[in-house]
Amino acid sequence: MKISELARLIDGIVEGSDDIEINGLSGIEAAKPGDLTFAMNENRLAGAEKSGASCILTDKLLRKSTKTLIRVTNPKLSFLLVYNKFNTPKSRVSFVHPTATLSESADIGKNVWIGPNVIIEDNVIIGDGTIIEGNSVIKKGTEVGGFCHLYPNVTLYENVKLHKNVILHSGVVVGSDGFGYVKDKDKIYKFPQLGKVIIEENVEIGANTTIDRGSLSDTVIGSGSKIDNLCQIAHNVKTGRNMLMAAQCGISGSTTVGDNLIMGGQSGIIDNITIGDNVTIASKTGVIGNIASGSVVWGLPARPIGQTKRQMAVVSWLTDNFKSISKLLK
Amino acid sequence: MKISELARLIDGIVEGSDDIEINGLSGIEAAKPGDLTFAMNENRLAGAEKSGASCILTDKLLRKSTKTLIRVTNPKLSFLLVYNKFNTPKSRVSFVHPTATLSESADIGKNVWIGPNVIIEDNVIIGDGTIIEGNSVIKKGTEVGGFCHLYPNVTLYENVKLHKNVILHSGVVVGSDGFGYVKDKDKIYKFPQLGKVIIEENVEIGANTTIDRGSLSDTVIGSGSKIDNLCQIAHNVKTGRNMLMAAQCGISGSTTVGDNLIMGGQSGIIDNITIGDNVTIASKTGVIGNIASGSVVWGLPARPIGQTKRQMAVVSWLTDNFKSISKLLK
Amino acid sequence: MKISELARLIDGIVEGSDDIEINGLSGIEAAKPGDLTFAMNENRLAGAEKSGASCILTDKLLRKSTKTLIRVTNPKLSFLLVYNKFNTPKSRVSFVHPTATLSESADIGKNVWIGPNVIIEDNVIIGDGTIIEGNSVIKKGTEVGGFCHLYPNVTLYENVKLHKNVILHSGVVVGSDGFGYVKDKDKIYKFPQLGKVIIEENVEIGANTTIDRGSLSDTVIGSGSKIDNLCQIAHNVKTGRNMLMAAQCGISGSTTVGDNLIMGGQSGIIDNITIGDNVTIASKTGVIGNIASGSVVWGLPARPIGQTKRQMAVVSWLTDNFKSISKLLK
């Protein structure tokens, strides 16, 4: 496709020759002649110029280039849209591997792909166009929506409900018992974990992440949310829409989270609290109380990020001036 | 069952009409007429009153209610005991799915349930009444006690020993090699990991948690302990009885832990130290030295929780008064 | 083997009777007569003397003993070398379990062992002498080098490349999609994750660790690296040689790491930064900027460990003297 046509597709403005043919897309490191790449800042632009790429998607603020540019509002998004244009998802086909173990009472939709050694128990419902890869297990009464994709070695316990377009990566466990016990004298009793897990549409969950079922209410993951690898969602947690949770984060039991939460890696939220909408929690933060909508927090305990940085600066300054302070005090 | 009968069962005192029939148990959110629910504080009591519930389990200190109350010492425990009364565990039945791969030298007890694609290697011993769900793997010489429950996709390496009533959730790995290496010049040698893992009775282990085998001694999880999801127990660790470990915690190699340890989420303990009995470690704490029995610690590094809170308050105060301090110093 | 012969093997100096026959190796706790054990410090030496061991490997600085000593430069290394001398790895044999699902286009080397329910998809290449244990899955086009060992329930996605002598413990996932999204208004788009994962030779990866594929470039784990359980390596990360990463650590996307990195448990590194050679990151640290070669860092945020300790000491001192400081300020 010519650069001129590409530019029209993504509403971009060409700067330089628009007559070149584009045959592929690639990152800066691997770009070869005929490739389209993208650059979000001056550094990356310099890199892109040194690469073999024939054309660079960039924004409206960066400098002029020796190569042909297409200027757009969000170069990464435009790159992605071009990619999706040329890489439509494969159509889903009906297939059941002979080694799969399917209950007769399971209700399997059209064009469902079921890999080797998959186990589907009684009264499971699988929506149209869903892919369930090898060695995954779906227990009794669980419902998987249409066009979901379960990678190998996923486990869904009983009475889990996935809406459509949910992607679960390998090792994900959904519906395991919540961590609920009652201690009395020297004995620890297991509290019943009877709730469901409901995962709304367009959610993607990373490898080896675990989501526990509710105890007496349900655990809910809001639509559009993306959860990275090795995260933990405890029983009765309810998250809003479009959460972005980086790897190794956790939300403790019965906490409720608004829309658009962003959690940096290895951060955690304590149990039984409420997080507002549009909150950002930076990496490694430990949240131990409610957070108001729109807050950006960091640290242990979580505080507004400006305050945490100020405290860190003051501690540094006090340490540097420790001798003077100590002398003054005497 | 009438409220009067229920109250007798759990040694409770009825306040209000005791003539109502109870048909089910549920949390406050889902309670409908005929249901028993429970409330541990005034807030929850108000919620329970607004719910459809016909009767509320509560303690002896909360206010009177418009609904019938049963007053007990520990409402959550009493709720659980009523639940258990009406939900006796299913009796275990003998079953081996035809797709399971069982070594002839395996010694399988009575009423053992073995799901599809389970792999049981040579000289494994499985106690009576144990359930091993689909796609789980038990390697050579491992011993699983009676009435255990392995959910799907569990892996037990060689020479692991589970006592009775152990529950392992999906993705649990027990007996993987400990992280033991010797570095010499530019080479890293793997140190032999020859010990066992011993998991004592009544232990429950959450999804995707990993427990490494000992190197030259054994790794031991004390009876009654409950470990949440995504936790890590390193080689040679020995924990006491009734540990409660929340999600994403870790204990490093060769550390010894007393009875009744409580670990909040995402906390960790360094290697080769000793933790006393009845210790509580709050969320996100990093323990880097021995902890005496009875301590409650928090922070990085772990300090008595009062001290950590005082330090945080002082840092806040110093930051607020930074200008005055800075001026004074000049 | 006589002590005198053993000593010659490891270039050690015998102190005491060298005429005793050694039949086994063991740790101090389990040592019985006829056993060789080792002690790295005075405490352990005292323990070794109280044990049944007939001979103790120790270094050149520790005190004399009532038992026969063999003095060497690195007792733990020498113990390991003796162990390896008497425990040569089992020779690898050719075996494919009848329940395995192998694509006809897979290229399986000599003496490869493939366990029950293993799934090997199209165009996979498996090198000579590799072991793939039960219920593991290897997706299309992935290449596994010679003498690798995949424990049960491992998942390799498409286009992963393992060099020789790689060990993957149970639950490891390699090649899952990186956490890459573009947010635009109220929509979150999935960014293509097209890169490979390359794991160089002699790498060992612990149970339930996850390594994401690159987005537009590759994720690379340098040769000789050892990664513990429940760790996360994000897309496009490139690590140097001989990394030692303890459990529950994470490295965020597109970060580059030099040789010989050591990461203590539960530490993390932010995305898009550069870590030099020979860096040590202590437990629980949060690295949020580039780190120069040779640094030893600790804390949140990561600072040179001496500085972090000094700051902690100053905060303690300020807290202890809070009343005086407060009075002075008034």
Image (tube, coloured by chain):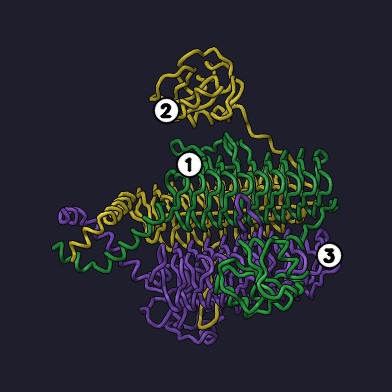
Chain colours: A yellow, B purple, C green
Q: For numbered disc 2, what is the local secondary structure?
A: helix
> Is A131 in front, or is C195?
C195
Q: Mark 2 points at which residue?
A: A42
Q: For numbered disc 1, what is the local secondary structure?
A: strand
Specify the subunit that label 3 lies on: B
Q: Residue C111 carries which label?
A: none
Q: Mark 1 points at which residue?
A: C274
Q: For numbered disc 3, what is the local secondary structure?
A: loop
Residue B34 seen by the camera: no
2 vs 3, front mark: 2
Specify the subunit that label 2 lies on: A
Same chain for labels 2 and 3? Say yes or no: no
Report the Cα–Cα distance between label 2 and label 3. 63 Å
> Is B107 in front, or is A198?
B107
Residue C54: image location, x then y, percent? 70, 76
Q: Residue B103 carries which label?
A: 3
